[in-house]
Amino acid sequence: MTISASGLRKNFGDQVVLDGIDLDVPEGTVFSLLGPNGAGKTTAVQILSTLIGADAGEVTICGHDLRHDPDGVRSVIGVTGQFSAIDGLLTGEENLVLMADLRHLPRREGRRIARRLLARFDLEDAATRRAATYSGGQRRRLDLAMTLVGDPRVIFLDEPTTGLDPRSRHGLWQIIRELVASAGVTIFLTTQYLEEADQLADRIAVLDRGELVAQGTSDELKKLVPGGHVSLRFGDARSLDAAARALGPVGRDDEALTLQVPGDGGVRSLRALLDELDRAAVEPDGLTVHTPDLDDVFFALTGRAIPEESAR
């Protein structure tokens, strides 16, 4: 595992922020950590990125022990936080060169990397403008470009698209996908946008009151909550009646000629449903599988809707 944490704990005074969480993130994947305000998401990122210490627990990142080899961890990670680390008085190119200097890269190498990243993040036309004049999307792209100066193997993205318009958000999503696909980078993502986790993450964990209440793929998490069903549409009332008799008590809409059958939408349950219709010699004109979305999962697991703003 690129990131492995076990028994991770953190208190702030009497407040338990992380209560012994376990995480495993494979190489070259996107892992998303969701949770309400105060759930501990940002604290987890701060610990894993060596910004603060844990009270207990074991963590390794790319084989480096977090407690005993923090410099080794820092050498393989990059961090893009909730708030931009860009110097607005410098140009985009100057910000990247400054980051290369902080990484102790040779001056010529730093400039070469800066030019490459400006091109990669579609910032060449803005390279010589002060970063204070950049749009929100440009600032986030520059922020992520600065994170890549040291060629990290793991990138922590703490709510990277907060405040961006939909076009800029989707543009950043594409950059994240390309980083994983082309460079094999591992992404640890916290986000307030459930669609973002749904679109990007290979695995998702839900953190609530310092505890991990669920982990899995997006589809696996959606199957944890009720509300899934299969909608069957028929060509005439006679077929509808025959299907209703075969399937027993189900939701029925005589005007639309549809039946609503509870189910998780999985292959096994769909096969069983169609087999039951075959035995009754009834064939639907069409079917649609409806599953709960991540909003439903989030509310069911935490008892709260997704918050609008993030906190520690």
Image (cartoon, rainbow, N blue to C red):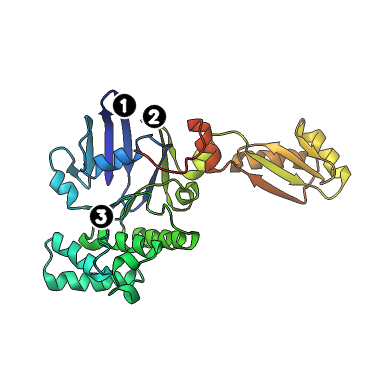
Disc 3 is placed on an element classified as: loop
Confirm or deny contact between disc 3 and disc 1 (CB under 8 A): no
Q: Earlier in the sequence, mark 3 or mark 1?
A: 1
Which quarter of the rendered picture does the N terminus lie within?
top left
Using the numbered discs, state the Cα–Cα distance from disc 3 to disc 1 in whole angstroms: 31 Å
Mark with earlier residue (1, 2) = 1
Q: Between residue 67 and residue 158, name the one nearer to us.
A: 158
Q: Residue at x 81, y 43 (%)?
A: 281
Q: Position of residue 130 (x, y in %)?
A: 28, 69
Q: Position of residue 240 (x, y in %)?
A: 83, 42
Q: Position of residue 66 (x, y in %)?
A: 18, 40
Residue 58 sits in which quadrant? top left
Answer with left or right where residue 17 lies relative to residue 224.
Answer: left
**Residue that badge 1 annotates:** 16
Q: Which residue is mark 2?
A: 209
Mark 2 Cα within 10 Å, few/some/many (few <14, many 20+)? Answer: some
Which one is in front in this view, the residue at disc 3 or the one at disc 1? 1
Q: Is residue 60 left or right of residue 222?
A: left
Q: Amino acid at mark 1?
A: Val
Give, as a three-letter code, the residue at label 2. Answer: Arg
Q: Which residue is mark 3?
A: 153
The reply to whether discs 1 and 2 touch (Cβ–Cβ < 8 Å) is yes
